[in-house]
Image: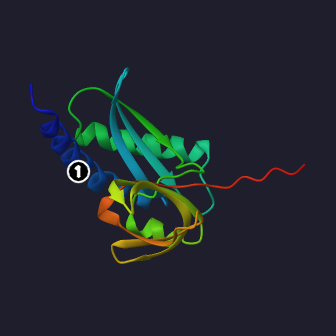
Amino acid sequence: MAPRGAFLCMADLILDRLNGLLEPCVEAMGYELADLELKRERRGQVLRLFIDQDSGIGLEDCERVSGQVSALLDVEDPIPGHYNLEVSSPGLDRKLAKPEHFDRFAGRRVQVRMRGPHLGRRNFGGTLLAREGEVIVLDVPDGTGRVELDLQDVVVARLAPEIHFED
């Protein structure tokens, strides 16, 4: 049995290959491949694609992309073994997976989890002010103020939408 680290390296290689294969296909259809993940779950492996476009994503968009991507995956066969394909919108709390996502969503509230402690903590919530090269800048409202975080140390960053209900 391969050590867990070897599996992660293999998974990274597969994800890189999948991204290189699928991103041009999805973009040719007029969508952004916002993120993709390959996970081992109880029911087996699942390949999830998160697609986006300025006008939003509907069920028909997901079906259209799923059909094209499924045909491409059948030909290229980049994933060993059986897997299920899921295509979805990124959702309101979308993951910020690419550097350009931080540019696009500047001014929005985010939640960021760091690989290790920064200023004595790993989790930050606040307004995303900017991306400056390989650093993101947040305004953290708990008195911390302006915080600069290295993108390479970010485990996950997500939008944290504020939903206000009227009485």
Screen quadrant of the N terminus: top left
- Decide if residue 87 is on the left or right side of residue 149: right
Residue drawn at x 38%, y 44% as measured from the top left: 69
Question: In this view, which residue lies farthest toward the top?
Answer: 43
Q: Name which quarter of the figure residue 109 lies in.
A: bottom right
Describe the colour scheme in one phrase.
Answer: rainbow
Q: Nearer the viewer, residue 59 or 111?
A: 111
Percent across and percent down for residue 103 are: 48, 73
Residue 151 found in image quarter? bottom left
The image quarter in which residue 68 lies: top left
Residue 98 % position (x, y): 39, 62
- Determine if residue 24 is in view: no
Q: Position of residue 61 (x, y in %)?
A: 56, 48
Q: Which residue of the protein is positioned furthest toward the right in this rendering?
A: 167
Q: Is residue 23 above or below residue 75?
A: below
Q: Is 135 rendered above or below residue 86?
A: below
Q: Is residue 139 above or below residue 31?
A: below
Secondary structure under tag 1 reads helix
Circle 1 packing at 10 Å, graded few (<14), some (14-19), many (20+), is few
Q: Residue at x 81, y 50 (%)?
A: 165
Of residues 145 and 75, which is closer to you in this image? 145
Q: Residue at x 59, y 71 (%)?
A: 107
- The reply to whether residue 27 is in sight is yes
Q: How many marks on residues?
A: 1
Residue 7 shown left or right of residue 85 in the figure: left
Name the residue beneath numbered marker 1.
17
Residue under the image location 30 percent in, 53 percent down = 19
Left or right position of 136 against 73: right
The three-letter code of the residue at mark 1 reads: Arg
Which of the two residues, 138 or 35, is positioned nearer the viewer here?
138
